[in-house]
Image (cartoon, helix red, strand yellow):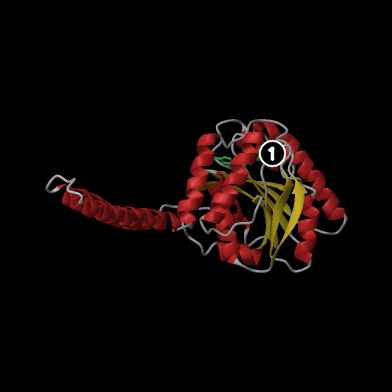
Amino acid sequence: MKLYLVIPCYNEEAVLSETSKRLRGKYDTLMSAGKISPDSRIVFVNDGSKDKTWEMICDLHKADPVFRGICLSRNKGHQNALMAGLMTVKDECDAAISMDADLQDDINAIDAMVDKYAEGYEVVYGVRSSRKKDTFFKRTTAQGFYKVMKAMGVETVYNHADYRLMSSRALNALSEFDEVNLFLRGIVPMVGFKSTEVTYERGERFAGESKYPLKKMIAFATEGITSMSIKPIRLIATLGMLVFLASIGILIYSIIRYFMNATVPGWAFLAVSIWALGGVQLLAIGVIGEYIGKIYLETKHRPKYIISQYLNDD
Ligand code: UDP
Ligand code: MG
């Protein structure tokens, strides 16, 4: 089986040499066990790094053809870099595994993923059995995020990040999704095919810093929700309905006050009008606004990524 590893890298000079060494070791054991063929490759995607990442990838490729490099023209974010890598290799390999450059996701899970592929699974999700080594902050925000996604009706695999194996066929199906707002964890389950999970323990980043500061995490979570779910529309609509119902309550209240002779002329009419109109407007604005937002994004047809170079064997 021809396996490709796809690894997005953004300013990863601190981890690249160690990562490539460990992956090369894994590659050798898998190959001597006859699980993968010698034409398997390890592909690094440089996501517009500002440090020496690309130079290091070039050196790796020069010294050892097992390593390949794809260089994006600028920083496009984790999801787009991953997509760029997967779409570039989708027709060359039998299956590709995506993983992070910092090897927080245990590379020993690759064996189990390859075995599952041999059993006929086309999508194998890597699932974190524990996150003890993550910081308290990372763990709670991440798990909160999975729960919010679920509440929003988005089908995702709990505690699965972008560490997964996909067959060439699944990747080709994935390429049919040309949405610009990319949230792979939500799209891959939509692709379908026979899928399963393998579990592993999540480790610590052994060098360098997280490339997902709070700002990027919030952007990522917002992207996940707004590109996958229409529940926020319904929430706004629900809010509008509640305000409208409140206006009926106020109507009843003001009739009571009227019979108690405790009203100023015109007060009931004004109070009820404000609440009723507010409710209807909130409902209408919410619904129309969300649709306009969607149309706006769809019409842009921005390219997801632009590849400036592709280092390959010849
Ligand atoms: N990454 C990327 N582009 C970005 C941010 C991150 O390609 O704009 C890559 C990064 O190099 C790493 C992976 O995405 O391989 C996950 O990032 P990180 O390990 O920093 O995230 P965390 O584990 O803290 O969630
Ligand atoms: Mg990490």
The amino acid at mark 1 is Asp
Where on the picture, by quarter, is residue 237? Answer: bottom left
Residue 3 rendering spot, x and y as whole percentages: 73, 57
Residue shown at 19% from the left, 45% from the top:
262
| Residue found farthest to the left | 265
Residue shown at 59% from the left, 38% from the top:
10
Residue shown at 80% from the left, 48% from the top:
108
| Number of other residues with Cα within 10 Å of mark 1, as a class: few under 14, some 14 to 19, many 20 or more | many
Residue 312 rendering spot, x and y as whole percentages: 65, 50
113 or 245, which is in the foreground?
245
| Whether residue 138 is situated above or below residue 256 in the rendered picture | above
Where on the picture, by quarter, is residue 235? Answer: bottom left
Residue 73 rendering spot, x and y as whole percentages: 50, 42
Q: Is residue 44 left or right of residue 32?
A: left
Residue at image mark 1? 102
| Residue found farthest to the right | 33
Q: Is mark 1 within 8 Å of ligand 2?
A: yes
Task: Tell me, yes or no, if residue 13 can be seen here.
Answer: yes
Q: Is residue 216 left or right of residue 66?
A: left
163 or 53, which is in the foreground?
163
Question: Where ligand 2 lies, by quadrant?
Answer: top right
Q: Is residue 177 left or right of residue 98?
A: left
State the quadrant of the N terminus: bottom right
133 or 238, which is in the foreground?
238
